[in-house]
Amino acid sequence: MPPTAPSADSTTPASAAPVAPVYDSYDRTSATRFPVAVDAALQDAGWRTGRWDIQQAEHWADALRAHTSPAGHRHTVFPAAVEAWAEFGGLDITPTGPGRHLAPTPFTLGPLHGLHLARTLGDLGRALETDVAPLGQEAGGQAVLAIDTEGRVYSLDHTGDWYLGPHIDQALNTLVLGIRPTRLSQATAREN
């Protein structure tokens, strides 16, 4: 499905920030799944259409399930997380462009970067009324990436919690293209 874009007769002022394409549904085998810059960054990191390492994803799932924090907190594992790990896990992605709204930073997709954050992710999940699993990290640990049961993706850093998109594809677009994420609040969490 093509991205939705503002119509030509939109009443949005010319000074408004650009709107990133939103992909309501997607075909994992589509050659036009990502914008050119995102596709190039993913391919440079080793991703190819049809990439699917379910054995590695299951290994990560087992490692997360087996981990218990000293205070007794545990991770949850669910299909949306395992699918994201199977397709994108292990990639070190380095955006090359200047970014639309902010400078993009390198990020790594691998859930074990959040292994010791079971309580933090559990707290976020309770606030969002869903389960949340680790997805990776931004800029060598400056932020942790997380995914919920619906496939929505978040970034948690020292300044707050951020919504990156309704699914992994949009989150990758947000990260690689330097699109300003939405800061989470109780209101935005319910909307998304």
Image (tube, rainbow, N blue to C red):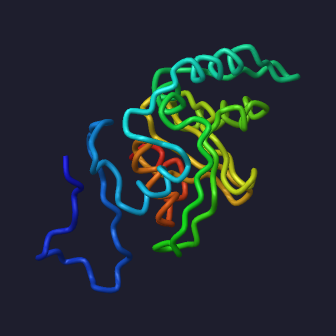
Q: Position of 36 compared to 76: left or right?
A: left
Q: Position of 161 compared to 84: left or right?
A: right
* Residue 3, picture quadrant: bottom left
Total of numbered circles in the picture? Answer: 0
- Residue name at image x 58 percent, y 31 percent: 132
Identity of the residue furthest to the bottom in this view: 15
Quadrant position of the C terminus in the picture: top left
| Relative to 161, residue 101 above or below | below
Rendering coords of residue 104 (x, y %) = 57, 66
Rendering coords of residue 2 (x, y %) = 20, 52
| Relative to 72, residue 12 above or below | below
* Residue closest to the eye, 4 or 126: 4
| Relative to 63, residue 118 above or below | below
* Residue closest to the eye, 70 or 25: 25
* Residue closest to the eye, 133 or 97: 97
- Residue name at image x 44 percent, y 57 percent: 40
- Residue name at image x 53 percent, y 44 percent: 46
* Residue 152, picture quadrant: top left
Q: Position of 76 compared to 157: left or right?
A: left
Identity of the residue furthest to the right in this view: 70
* Residue 25, picture quadrant: top left
Q: Position of 16 compared to 6: left or right?
A: right
| Relative to 169, residue 126 above or below | above
Rendering coords of residue 70 (x, y %) = 88, 22
Rendering coords of residue 112 (x, y %) = 71, 32
